[in-house]
Amino acid sequence: MGSVLIIGAGGVGNVTAHKCAQIPEVFSKIVLASRNIEKCRKIQQDVKEKSGRNIDIAQVNADNVSETVSLIRKVNPDAVINVALPYQDLAIMDACLETGVHYIDTANYEPKDVPHFEYSWQWAYHDRFREKGIMAVLGCGFDPGVSNIFCAYAQKKLYDEIKTIDIVDCNAGSHGHPFATNFNPEINIREITQNGKYWEKGRWIETKPLEISIDFDYPEAGVKKSYLLFHEELESLVKHIKGLERIRFWMTFSENYITHLKVLQNVGMTRIDEVEFEGKKIVPLQFLKALLPDPGSLGANYKGKTVIGCVFDGVKSGQRKKIFIYNVCDHAECYREVKSQAVSYTAGVPPVLGAMLVINGIWKGKGVFNVEELDPEPFMELLNRHGLPWNQVNFQSSILEK
């Protein structure tokens, strides 16, 4: 039995708290902390209603290392799960280093003033975590996270050599709002409005935002237009999956979503630099975030499913074969279980499983690790037991060959 400190009380933090509460044999003590104590209190009440478990809550400014250190020392957790904003990753890692506590997150660090998605800042912590004798597990959400685990599993069990990987992410759900983002609007829009990028034959190839698309036939969701983006797991998978010739990431967006996004870009509402308004400095994207629905509030009316997975093309015993490993998650079922939509659910369950493996000593190591560097098989087994079952099928389509 162990204890966990969860930092972040948004849609993902809500799911993480609920799922930890469902596993008392591992998480005997749960503390949820955020700058917004009212959000923590609401989740605390919902967890009590759903599982009967009492979780503790605390207020913390995760940008402030000394404040986080004080909270960690008070709670004395076996692990810290960081589901706060990516801007806060390094400050929370610093606090874990100072207190000697394992660290798990779901998204890579991103500077607030520059939309720049890469692992270099966090990888630079490796020696310090190793010397402290603790683990930092990076990107343990769904993508990154489960997608990386699928890749590690394919490399370990299914292939002698993987030639290409295409990560596909479809949200075929409907929330009833004219325009909303399924996770933090600021992070979501920064990600989508950047140039796309993929890796092929030893080099990175850059594309314009949403320049390349395909019509992909998703299980249980049908054919959806999917756009090529850069996603941070590509950077780590290029390092850790041997023999790769190409890796890409695709995500679906509706025409309605694209139209709204283009208009917002055209009028300057997606800018991340400060502008002056009535004598005050504001960041347009942060102002837009205040106007849009809270992703955590979308679940009640959400219908439909998400489908996320990896298409592999490679060689096993001299034979070329294509395999698709994927998960299907239902928005309405997620809401019934933990009052969440499926996008938050798929991101909030995996760090719980990662924390379980770290606390139980199944994932061992000293330093900083991306999840594909760790044993995928116990994680794959936990996915089936804790709400994210996966499917494996032979893949026949030629749509990804171009």
Image (cartoon, helix red, strand yellow):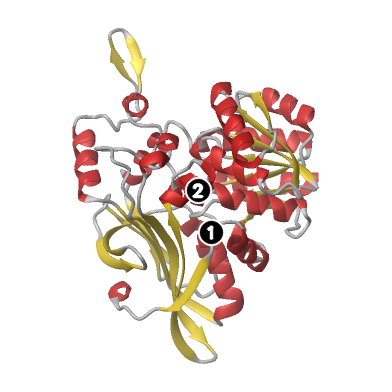
Residue 345: assigned label: 2
Provide residue 76's location: percent of width, then percent of height: 79, 34
Tell me the residue at 63%/49% (across/down). Answer: 352
> Does 98 appear above or below 133?
above
Towards the viewer: 253 or 241 = 253
Question: Marks 2 and 1, Cα distance to the nearest angstrom?
Answer: 9 Å
364 with respect to 174 (left or right): right
Q: Secondary structure at mark 1?
A: loop
In this view, which residue lies farthest toward the bottom? 318
Mark yes or no: residue 116 visible. yes
Towards the viewer: 372 or 183 = 183
125 with respect to 274 (left or right): right
Provide residue 229's location: percent of width, then percent of height: 35, 54
- Amino acid on which disc 1 is placed: Leu
The mark nearer the N terminus, 2 or 1, is 2
Provide residue 241's location: percent of width, then percent of height: 54, 69
Residue 388: assigned label: 1
382 with respect to 24 (left or right): left
24 with respect to 373 (left or right): right
In this view, which residue lies farthest toward the top? 279
> Does 346 appear above or below 249?
above
Q: Do the residues bearing badges 2 and 1 touch, measured as CB atoms within 8 Å?
A: no
Q: Secondary structure at mark 2?
A: helix
- Amino acid on which disc 2 is placed: Tyr
